[in-house]
Amino acid sequence: MLSRRALLATAALSSLPATLGPRLAPPARAAAGETIRIGVLPFGTASWEAAIIRARGLDAANGFTLETVKLAGNDAARIAFQGRQLDTIVGDLIWAARLRTEGRGVKFVPYSTTEGALMVPADSPIKGLPDLAGKRLGVAGGALDKNWVLLRAQAREAARLDLESAARIAYGAPPLLMQKLEAGELDAALLYWTYCARLEAKGYRRLISADDIMRAFGAKGPVALIGYLFEGDTVRDKAAAVEGFARASAAAKEVLASDPSAWTLVRPLMAAEDDATFEALKRNFLAGTPRRPIATERDDAETIYATLARLGGERLVGDAKALPPDLYLDGARNG
């Protein structure tokens, strides 16, 4: 569970200038073109990247000014984005494709290839998918979560196991499922990557990851199913600023990969209660940096999206049976 100290960490983003040490002091901010307003969640990784962009002056260096807006959760982020109150949020590829198919000119900039995993205790007798039969399985995100859709399909194909009927499924919020797994009330839990990292720091192990499953379904490399979303009119009206943001995002990831001192700014935003948790979160975040060309990224994304559309149907993807054309932002470079 998060300590009171960790729960207060969200204040760090709004008081950013006071947290900067001498090495991370921001440069004088020259006029920097248009403002990009990004919505960030408490302890969300987008706030880590935003903090580095602002502290290192990567926004001004790329011709825009970054403004962060703290939001309570994913629903609030989606509402604010659709209401044009924000220029960008981190969202998943499925929702971006759905919006574009519905007539909105949404563009997608790959953000991270790190996905969730099925976690079990270190000493669990569960060694493979067949062992999940009869077990208590927690699933974050609900019945239509993309990781759950893929896991169910993999269990059917690789183990001839219908997890929905063969296991005892409990849907819930990730923090609650994590607590239940630690308390022994669940045998396994399918969780988002930040919770997987926290459990890894406590000795839990991954039974299978979303990346493993996507490769089994034909992906040739790590796929970024999470990205920055921009409305088409934002891309049109703030073209230089949006492209500058994509460059600044890549530059911030490079700073975090190459300069350990940068993490002194980010750590208060991570709710990492010990060094092991901090290192696990850091390692998994850096491992998710997209580094493939957009064309290659899209090829694999189309493969996985087609699989999700076939398995999840209209309830998952709406009318978007395939990735719509021009979904990816032209000129957005990876890694």
Image (cartoon, rainbow, N blue to C red):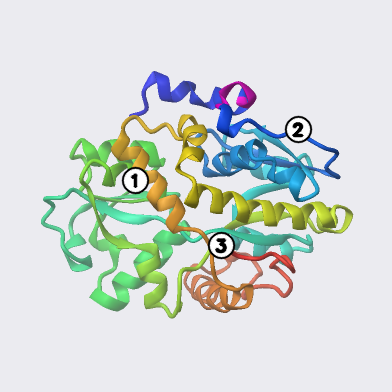
Give the amino acid type for the residue marked by disc 3 in the picture: Arg
> Where is the C terminus found, in terms of image quarters?
bottom right
Give the amino acid type for the residue marked by disc 1 in the picture: Ala
Per the model, the C-alpha gap separating discs 2 and 3 is: 49 Å
* Residue depth check, mark 1 versus mark 3: number of the one nearer the observer: 1
* CB atoms of marks 1 and 2 within 8 Å: no
Tell me if 40 is positioned left or right of 232 in this view: left
Per the model, the C-alpha gap separating discs 1 and 3 is: 34 Å
Q: Which residues are magenta?
A: 16-21
Q: Position of residue 78 (x, y in %)?
A: 66, 45
Q: Position of residue 113 (x, y in %)?
A: 49, 61
Residue 66 vertical position relative to residue 147 in the rendered view, above or below: above
Residue 290 forms part of the magenta stretch: no
**What secondary structure is the stretch in magenta mostly built from?**
helix
- Secondary structure at badge 1 equals helix
Tell me if 238 is positioned left or right of 7 in this view: right
Instruction: Of the two numbered discs 1 and 3 on the same chain, state the one appearing first in sequence.
Output: 1
- Secondary structure at badge 3 equals helix
Tell me if 235 is positioned left or right of 175 in this view: right
* Residue for point 42% across, 64% down: 149
Disc 3: which residue: 315
* Residue depth check, mark 1 versus mark 2: number of the one nearer the observer: 2
* Residue for point 27% across, 42% down: 201
Viewer-side residue, 84 vs 281: 281
Check residue 10 in the rendering and tell me which mark sits there, or answer none. Answer: none
Disc 1: which residue: 280
- Secondary structure at badge 2 equals loop
Q: Quadrant of residue 154?
A: bottom left
Give the amino acid type for the residue marked by disc 2 in the picture: Ala
Disc 2: which residue: 28
